[in-house]
Each structure stands twice: as structure tokens, then as C-alpha cells.
Amino acid sequence: MNSANQNMDCKSLIKIISILIFFSVNLILAAEDDDWMDSMRVGDASLELSSLELMLDPKTAEELNVIALAWRDSLKETIQQISDLGLKDKLSDEDKKNSDGLIDKKEKLLTLFRIVISELENKGGDLRDLKSYADAVSKAQIAVSKDASFGAKYSSWITSKEGGVKLGIQILKFLFVLLAFWVLAGFVRKIVRQAAEKSDRFSELLEQFMIKISFRAVMVIGFIVALGTVGINVAALLTVIGGASFIIAFALQDTLSNFAAGIMLLIYRPFDVGDMVEVGGVSGKIDQVSLVSTIIRTFDNKIVLVPNKNVWGQIITNSSTPKERRVDMIFGIGYGDDVEQAKQILTQIVQDHELVLEDPEPTIQLHELADSSVNFICRPWVKTADYWQVHWDVTQRVKAEFDQSGISIPYPHQELHIKQIK
């Protein structure tokens, strides 16, 4: 019995010693944890940002999570104090002084809290709740009396680092980014213009389009970057724009078809600015081409705006693209006139004109025996710009030479024979 009692006493003693050792270790670890957390200076608004970054650098994600929660609780306590002051109907001078100090402390704690969140994010920690809390309390809370003036109510927000100061900095950042991209867009536009002018493969229309689109594309990118700089979720914005694009495209079918036709006109270049064309029954000079419409100036100086889908979908006759053109003219003489003399006169008139080209050679031949006249074709070759001048000069000279040589220029007529029946 004595031996059994001794064994039981030994076992009990061992259990007691084990329990004492367990609690001692936990107390030591807890003390170490307290010392570790105290060394982080949680809630100390006087802590420098660089010092906090050095303290956080060796910590693991698990340790940083504990630190972040501690900083959140400290920030929460300060905000609660500000809210308590804001609930008072009237504030004493001391309360107002304390309110200003608490707001400054809150702003500094919020800045330090964001540094802890950033370090936790870099090391793969879960910070969705912490970041949401920081964003939610970033709006400055003003503890002033309810009957204060408008200026008094919002003066603290205007001077707050998380209020008016932060908004002003964001606006300046936004404008600075836009200005930087505006300068970059101007430089890109200049480079594109120089490259387009040196190349012979681009029409004037395509050059203008490339210059405009290069500037606008850079500015659009700059606007998106500027929005991202001030904290706007650009991905969500682009998603909304993409979803709305389908509705917009459906509502603007005709405009988009004109736009597509404008792109085809720029790529295949059936005409250029200044060309003489005939499109869909409209003849004139190309005055301007945009991605939506083509402006034609008629020969009597009327402005005709033609949608690009009608231009691309019609037969296009361009009289200015070829460098040389043939002037087609027909002259008729009477059946009783000298054919050889008339041919010689036409040949001499064409040869004497200084704007008529020697190569290709002009064609002058008796073409047909019509009902009322013997018709000659006269086809000299000229520069495209001289087409109408040669046409007018030759026609006028033919009339004068034929009259002088006694060659008639007949006009359609009918002979009526009446037969009497006895």
C-alpha cells in the first residue's frame, strides 16, 4: 500500500510540475508578445513613416496581420473620440482644440495604417477588409457645433490631408498627367506628319487621318492613365464602356456604316482632296473627306455633302488621277464638202496647239456617215489639267477655219416631198 501511495504521489507531483511549466512558458511567451507589440509603437502618431517601414520589413505575413489589426483598433479608437465630440450640441474652446488635434492624429494614424496594409499586401496577406475599412474612414470627420457657419463646418475638411488637401493633390496629379500626355501627343503627331510627308504611298486623306488619329489615341490613353492615377477603377470603367458599346453600335448603325466606308476610302484611295470626280450623279472637286462624309464642291461652286456609304457604294469616276487625258471631239461636215481638206484643217489645228502632246499621237479620222453629216473624230492627248482649255480652243478654231474655207457644219434637217395624185 505504501508503494502504491508513493507512486500516486509521484504521478501527481509530475502533473503539477507539468502544469506549472506550461503556464510559465505561456506567461513568458505572452510577455514576449507584449514586448514585441510594444516595440512596434502601435498607435503612436509621432512615429516616422520611414521608421515604421524599417520595423515592418522583417515581419512575416502572419505577424503583419496581427500588427495591422492593432493599428486598425488604434485608428478606430481615435475616430470614436472624434465622433463623440461631433455628437455634442455645443463645443467649448477646449473641445474644438481637442477636435483639431484628434483629426490630425487620425490623419497620421490612417497614413501609418496604409503603410502596414501595403507591406502586408506585398507579402501576400489578406487585406480586403482592412483596405475597405481604411477607404471607408478616410473621409475627414469634423467635430464642430451644429449651428456653426458653413465655412466653419468645412474649413477642417479643406485643410485636412485626407480631405481637401488630398482632393487638390489628386486634381493636380490628374491635370499633370493629362498635360504630359498632351505634350507627348503633340510630339507623336509631329513624327507621324513628318513620316507621312516623306512617303509617297499615302494620300493626303490618309495623311490627315493618321495625324488626327495618332494625337487622339495618345490623349485617350493619357485620360485612362490619369483616371487610374487618382484611384479610379479603370478596369470597371472599361467594362461599362464595353457593355454600352453594343447598344451604341445598334443605335448608330448608319453612322457606323459611314465610318466603315470612310475607312475603306482612306485605305483604297479612289480619290484625293482636289480631285475632279463624279459620284452618284454629283460631279465636282473633292473639298474634304471625313470618316463620316465626303464634301464635293460642284463646278458652279455648290457644296454637296455625300454620306460615305453612298460614295463607296456607287461608281466613282476620277478624272484627276491620270496625268494625261484624251480629248474626244466629233466634227461634222456636209456631204458636198471636201473630206481631205477638212481632215487637213483638223490636223493642222491640233498640231499648232501648244498644249497638245506629241506622244501619244492625236487621232483624226473620218468616223461615220451620219444622216445629215460626214463626221470626223478628233482625239488629241493633253495633260489632265489642260483638258478643258484644249477642248474649248480646238472647237473655236475649227468653227473659224471651216467658215473661212467654205466648209459647212450641217445641222439635222428633214426634207418633205409632196406627191400630187391626179
Image: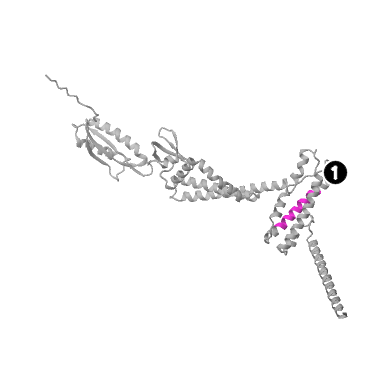
Residue 185 x %, y %: 56, 48
The answer to whether residue 48 shows anywhere in this view is no
Give the farthest residue toward the front.
Answer: 1
Give the farthest residue toward the bottom.
Answer: 3
Relative to residue 322, is residue 24 drawn left or right? right
Assign the N terminus to one quadrant of the image.
bottom right
Instruction: Name the image quarter holding residue 126.
Output: bottom right
Assign the C terminus to one quadrant of the image.
top left
Which residue, given by chain and number where applicable, does mark 1 sit on?
93
Give the farthest residue toward the top.
Answer: 422
Q: Nearer the viewer, residue 169 or 235?
A: 235
Please tell me which residue is depicted at 83% across the width and 70% down the height of the picture. Answer: 19
Q: Is residue 80 magenta?
A: no
Q: Is residue 109 magenta?
A: yes
Amino acid carrying mark 1 in the image: Asp
Residue 61 x %, y %: 70, 62
Relative to residue 330, is residue 135 drawn left or right? right
Q: Dot 1: what SS?
A: helix
Please determine whether, in this image, residue 59 is positioned above or below residue 99: below
Q: Nearer the viewer, residue 132 or 59?
A: 132
Q: Nearer the viewer, residue 52 or 2?
A: 2
Q: Which residue range is magenta in the image? A: 101-117
Instruction: Name the image quarter holding residue 326.
Output: top left
The answer to whether residue 313 shows anywhere in this view is yes
Considering the whole magenta stretch, tell me its main secondary structure: helix
Residue 344 x %, y %: 22, 38
Residue 145 x %, y %: 81, 41
Relative to residue 107, is residue 305 drawn left or right? left
Rendered image coloring scheme: one colour
Please tell me which residue is depicted at 21% across the width and 27% down the height of the picture. Answer: 414
